[in-house]
Image (cartoon, helix red, strand yellow):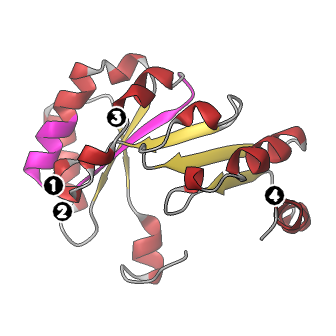
């Protein structure tokens, strides 16, 4: 879709919040223009990125939700860790955790990069791999200053459904 066609579609939905996600939305060269156009029209814009691309191209008024890929994802080596310094207090860092090893790694990254002073932190359990109750218990045991989130789309539409 073109930026004007997306804007037209969003205008007709009667909403004020738009989340741009992917895959990796920053691969698309039009993403910054789309975000800027939506912001100028008064929309709240969220951009969910996997952290592999430079987030400097995102308009600063947009809220960035950046995944910090845990070792269990086998994608943590693709992260551009310089992005952490580019986050603002309104932005969010999300860890999707599949086991105790991922959890301990995430806690270490929070400390190493002082993430609680930079942005909001979200912990989510990998659907079907780590029981949400277990992750919440670990968070409570360690008294972490994080928000817990479920991958709701997987509970609503199923784990194997794409494009929701």
Nearer to me, 122 or 74: 74
Which residue carries the number 3 mark? Answer: 146
Residue holding disc 4: 15
Locate residue 160, reporting x and y percent. Answer: 37, 83
| Residue assigned mark 2 | 130
Q: Earlier in the sequence, mark 2 or mark 3?
A: 2
Query: Compared with residue 83, is residue 7 higher up or lower down, i.e. above or below?
Result: below
Q: Secondary structure at mark 3?
A: loop
Question: Are the residues at dot 1 and dot 3 in contact (C-beta closer than 8 Å)?
Answer: no
Q: Quadrant of residue 114?
A: top left
Find the distance from the CA under tag 2 to the CA under tag 3. Answer: 17 Å
- Nearer the N terminus, badge 4 or badge 2? 4
Q: Which residues, given as a range, are shown in magenta?
A: 89-106
Is label 2 in contact with label 1 (beta carbons under 8 Å)?
yes
Distance, label 3 to label 4, CA atoms, is: 28 Å
Task: Decide: is 14 above or below 53.
Answer: below
Neighbour class for label 4 at 10 Å: few (<14), some, many (≥20)? few
Q: Position of residue 1 (x, y in %)?
A: 77, 71
Q: Are marks 4 and 1 in contact (CB under 8 Å)?
A: no
């Amino acid at each position: 879709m073109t930026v004007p066609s997306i804007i037209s579609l969003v205008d007709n939905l009667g909403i004020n919040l738009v989340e741009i996600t992917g895959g990796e939305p920053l691969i698309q060269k039009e993403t910054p223009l789309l975000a800027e156009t939506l912001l100028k029209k008064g929309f709240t814009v969220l951009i969910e990125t996997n952290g592999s691309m430079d987030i400097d191209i995102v308009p600063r008024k947009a809220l960035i939700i950046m995944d910090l890929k845990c070792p269990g994802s086998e994608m943590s080596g693709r992260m551009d860790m310089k992005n952490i310094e580019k986050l603002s207090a309104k932005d969010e860092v999300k860890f999707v955790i599949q086991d105790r090893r991922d959890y301990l790694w995430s806690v270490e990254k929070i400390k190493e990069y002082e993430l609680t002073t930079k942005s909001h932190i979200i912990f989510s359990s990998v659907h079907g791999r780590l029981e949400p109750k277990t992750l919440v218990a670990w968070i409570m045991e360690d008294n972490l200053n994080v928000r817990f989130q479920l991958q709701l789309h997987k509970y609503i539409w199923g784990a194997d459904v794409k494009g929701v």
